[in-house]
Image (tube, coloured by chain):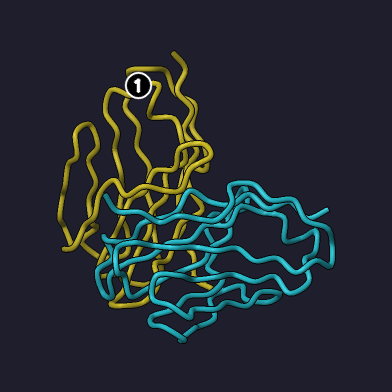
């Protein structure tokens, strides 16, 4: 059974804190993605990676960074969390070039106070 | 970044009714996908479409890849309470990240 797991389902942080969101997939997928989901705005791509140590900016990368040191793990980093980063964060992975293999994790609901 | 135009934004329907939603784009895609997101979970793939004009079914769900490659629709027949959720369309052109619609929130009244 394919699986994308995220380190936390719910997270509460304070403004200015450094926040790490971890994502692990067990399907040996090349590609990994981070999205944020806000009501009325759908899924917006933050960063993605097509290979280890490789990263590409998505549509809304400002205020975020990522790390991919191993193929199965893709981390999203909020260097200094702000209240406007309160959101649902979704990680996904897929086989390179095969769209219908994209699987999502359960999401992390982050609240920044 | 690009986003797809998905409509309607939300729907309230009676159990047993049929549902129709659609997605349009200003760009062409090679692949259209439809996902469903249950409350508190990540989206799950329902149907994938690969060819212009293709019509594909998955149980009570039917989806079509528009002939112009710029649109797709999803129909749900005889809705049931567990159909409640947010439905997303997504398009892809070659090995680029999926482009998503903003979602259609479906509520089913028993």
The residue most toward the top is B110
The percent position of residue B24, horizontal first and vertical second, equals 39, 58
Residue situated in front as seen by the camera: B73 or A112? A112
The percent position of residue B64, horizontal first and vertical second, equals 22, 50
The residue depicted at 51 percent of the width and 53 percent of the height is B102
Secondary structure type for disc 1: loop
Classify A55 as above or below A10. below
Left or right of B42? Residue B71 is: left
The residue most toward the bottom is A54
In this rendering, the count of numbered labels is 1
Residue situated in front as seen by the camera: A78 or B48? A78
The residue depicted at 38 percent of the width and 80 percent of the height is A50
Category of crowding for the residue at label 1, using alpha-carbon neighbours closer than 10 angstroms: few (below 14), some (14–19), many (at least 20):
some
The residue depicted at 22 percent of the width and 40 percent of the height is B62
The percent position of residue A46, horizontal first and vertical second, equals 56, 71
The residue depicted at 51 percent of the width and 36 percent of the height is B39
Left or right of A87? Residue B37 is: left
Residue situated in front as seen by the camera: A22 or B29? A22
Residue situated in front as seen by the camera: B95 or B78? B95
- Location of residue A81 by image quarter: bottom right
Query: Chain B colour?
Result: yellow
Classify B30 as above or below A3. below
Residue that mark 1 sits on: B80
- Which chain has been coloured cyan in this picture? A
- Location of residue A70 by image quarter: bottom left
Q: Chain of mark 1?
A: B
């Amino acid at each position: 059974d394919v699986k994308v797991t995220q380190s936390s389902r719910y997270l509460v942080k304070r403004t200015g804190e450094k926040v790490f969101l971890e994502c692990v997939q067990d399907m040996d997928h090349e590609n990994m993605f981070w999205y944020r989901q806000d009501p009325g705005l759908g899924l917006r791509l933050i960063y993605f990676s097509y290979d280890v140590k490789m990263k590409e900016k998505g549509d809304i990368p400002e205020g975020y960074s990522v790390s991919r040191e191993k193929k199965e793990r893709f981390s999203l980093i909020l260097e200094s969390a702000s209240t406007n980063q309160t959101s649902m964060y979704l990680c996904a992975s897929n086989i390179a070039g095969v769209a219908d293999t994209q699987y999502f994790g359960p999401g992390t609901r982050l609240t920044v106070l | 970044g690009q986003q797809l135009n998905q409509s309607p934004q939300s729907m309230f329907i009676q159990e047993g009714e049929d549902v129709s939603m659609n997605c349009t784009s200003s760009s062409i895609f090679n692949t259209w996908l439809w996902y469903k997101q249950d409350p508190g979970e990540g989206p799950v793939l329902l149907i994938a479409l690969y060819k212009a004009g293709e019509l594909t079914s998955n149980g009570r769900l039917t989806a079509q890849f528009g002939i112009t490659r710029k649109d797709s629709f999803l129909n749900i027949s005889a809705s049931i309470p567990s159909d409640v959720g947010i439905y997303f369309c997504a398009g892809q052109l070659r090995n680029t990240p999926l482009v998503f619609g903003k979602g259609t929130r479906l509520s089913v009244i028993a």
